[in-house]
Image (tube, helix red, strand yellow):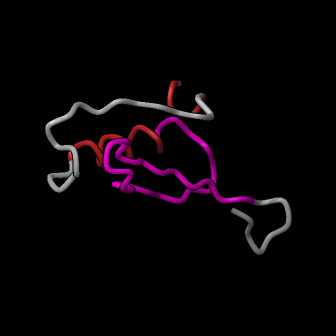
Amino acid sequence: MPTAVRGQFYRLYIVMDIYSRMIVGWEIHLDERAEHAAALISKACLRPDRPSRGCRCELRCPRGSACTR
């Protein structure tokens, strides 16, 4: 996501329920760090109103590195 400052970008983190395809969590940060991804995943998996509450959380990361550090 571009910003008003040239060369600076925001990082959008999204957690999506793969069964209902609903976005169950999202955050925007200035940098890409594993701590941001871990905190968001924890919050999204613990939400009581998550569409697939009975299913376990499964991690899929297309960019990989931020989620696996």
How many numbered marks have been drawn onto this rendered protein structure? 0
Confirm whether the magenta stretch covers residue 20: yes
Confirm whether the magenta stretch covers residue 51: no
Residue found at x 47% / y 44%: 36
Q: Quadrant of residue 22?
A: bottom left
Q: Nearer the viewer, residue 20 or 10?
A: 20
Image quadrant holding the N terminus, namely bottom right
Residue found at x 17% / y 56%: 49
Residue 52 sits above or below residue 2 on the image = above
Residue 52 drawn at (x, y percent): 21, 44
Q: Is residue 34 left or right of residue 63?
A: left
Residue segment shown in magenta: 9-36
Q: Residue furthest top?
A: 69
Residue 8 drawn at (x, y percent): 77, 60
Residue 32 drawn at (x, y percent): 61, 44
Q: Is residue 18 left or right of residue 31?
A: left
